[in-house]
Amino acid sequence: MQRWRGYEAAPGGWGRSVVTIGVFDGVHQGHQATIGHAVARARELGVRSVVVTFDPHPAEVVRPGSHPAVLTEPARKAELIEALGVDVLCVVPFTAEFSRLPAEAFVHDILVEHLHAALVVVGGNFRFGHRAAGDVALLERLGRTFGFGVEGAPLVAEAGTVFSSTYIRSCVDAGDVRAAAVALGRPHRVEGVVVRGDQRGRELGYPTANLLTHRYAAVPADGVYAARLIRRGGEPLVAAVSIGTNPTFSGRERRVEAYALDFTGDLYGERLALDFVAHLREQRTYDAIEPLVAQIAEDVERTRRAVS
């Protein structure tokens, strides 16, 4: 898969293409259906498929301070999109200037002049251009003018719930990682670099990796979880994960701490990923060390059963 920074990176002599556009945070089952449809139609037409996405999230530029929790970091999102068979991932820098681009200019500059769209695949709620003035009806009218088709991708739902990034964020925020995994089509993942913590886990016999996550990462609600710990180039490990402020020790800083079962070694400085499998319990405060250690031992065994 080719990766472009900006639609201006389209090479000279670029032929026709099938294009789909969106933030695609999470690359969830709905996104997979949309992108998969674009890839299939591109193959039918004998042209290349292009996914256009944006960085940073448009909400942060249009309404500073409103950046939503991020379900997939840029590198992970690119990997997931590539796995769907896409030919080109075009990441458009979303700036204040770009946000003021009128809907008609958005279509002309990106889809017509640079990507030479033969077909555009979008969801039914697709909006584009300054103040999100453009909708699918306008896109279809402009398509008739400029010579490209527009096809809508069906929504993906289960039990009446439409899968969307907003819905998945709400699941993660509530700690319902199983529901999030259903909508994503895989476990929700949080990534970060292991940094030094208070060393209390080591003193209790359960050394933990303290994960420094991205400021906008969609971290599940406070609690204890069963997860898989992913190391670069290594086999996945089973991990019991604690998220919260460590109330027993009067902690104030919210942390993500993972105890890797059956692992001995040093993880400091490594970039790890945690794939959340199940929520085990809420955070609790203990009056003494002994009941805390007993609870951790129980959490470890429940984690082993949940992940194995």
Image (tube, rainbow, N blue to C red):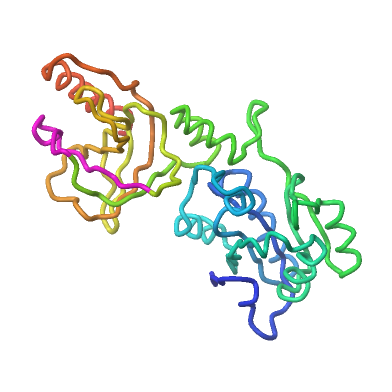
* 199 in the magenta segment: yes
Compared with residue 279, is residue 107 higher up or lower down, i.e. above or below? below
| Number of numbered discs on residues | 0
Q: Quadrant of residue 200?
A: top left
Residue visible at 64% across and 61% down in the picture: 96
Image: 258 above or below 128: above
In the displayed structure, 298 sits above or below 38; it is above
Q: Which residues are magenta?
A: 198-213
Q: Position of residue 58 (x, y in %)?
A: 61, 53
Report x, y in % for residue 247. Answer: 25, 24
In percent of width and height, residue 184 lies at 53, 41
User: Would you say 237 lies left or right of 204 here?
Assistant: right
Residue at (76% x, 76% y) in the render: 113
Q: Up-down: is 109 above or below 192?
A: below
Compared across the picture, whether 283 is left or right of 249 comes to: right
Q: Which residue is at the front of the view, 56 or 190?
A: 56
Residue shown at 22% from the left, 55% from the top: 269
Residue at 53 percent of width and 69 percent of height: 1
Residue 146 is a magenta residue = no
Quadrant where the image shows the C terminus: top left
Quadrant of res 154: top right
Which residue is nearer to you in this view: 293 or 275?
293
Seen in the image, is 276 located left or right of residue 205?
right
